[in-house]
Image (cartoon, rainbow, N blue to C red):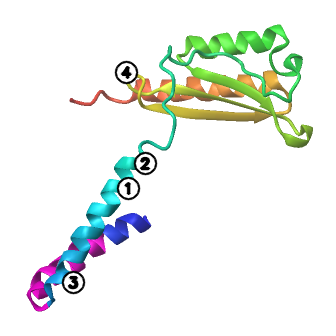
Amino acid sequence: MKFRAFLLVGCMVVVPAAAMFSHHLPPAVRAAPARLLKTLAARLVAAGPRAPALPAGPPCHAAVVPPADAPVAAVAGDESTATASAQLEALGAVAIECRPLPGGTGHLASCRVPVDAEGQLQRVFQAQAADADAALRGLNAAVAAWLRAVASRPATIR
């Protein structure tokens, strides 16, 4: 938000003011912003990308992933948890995970469901319950309800 406000002020106030009064400034002062921009651009190009590139690989597949500090049996150990995860996969959910909350107060299950055919837009769902099975069942109910609501909407013209 701050960047957009800065850009708005720059485009709507500073640039027209500079155009109106630039002929009153000495040539050295008029050339300073251009030198500054060239220097900044050269530094940015020399610095290169800051974040390392992610390795190319297959897209995320749905799986119940336990956190590193949680025992595997508490998250994906029983058959009903695997069944709830399979039902979520059948509904199109990806990146399904269920992890214990800090302090042992319950479990948090989450997943993403693609909104568009390409899968670039995704909706995130979360459900919290006392145990992993109940959290995944709640997540399953939330995803199913959303899919029913989307299916009942009239199709839009594209």
Compared with 94, 102 (above or below) is below
Disc 2 residue crowd, few under 14, some 14–19, many 20+, Cα 10 Å:
few
- Mark 2 vs mark 4, foreground winner is 2
- The span from disc 2 to disc 1 (Cα, nearest Å) is 6 Å
Alpha carbon separation for disc pair 4 and 1: 37 Å
Q: Earlier in the sequence, mark 3 or mark 1?
A: 3
Mark 3 secondary-structure assignment:
helix
Dot 2 lies on which element? Answer: helix
Q: Which residues are magenta?
A: 8-24
Of the two numbered discs 2 and 4 on the same chain, state the one appearing first in sequence.
Answer: 2
- Tell me the amino acid under the disc marked 4: Glu
Residue at 51% across / 22% down in the picture? Answer: 55
Q: Is residue 18 magenta?
A: yes
User: Where's residue 109, x and y in %?
Assistant: 71, 29
Dots 2 and 4: beta carbons under 8 Å?
no
Q: In the image, what residue occupies the spot 72% across and 21% down?
A: 65
Q: Identify residue for label 1.
A: 43
- Neighbor class of circle 1 (other Cα within 10 Å; few <14, some 14-19, many 20+) is few
SS state under label 4: loop
Badge number at residue 118: 4
Q: Which type of secondary structure does the marked residue at label 1 adopt?
A: helix
Instruction: In the displayed orientation, state which residue is furthest to the bottom.
Output: 24
Taking the image as shown, residue 77 lies to the left or right of residue 51, namely right
Residue with the mark numbered 3: 29
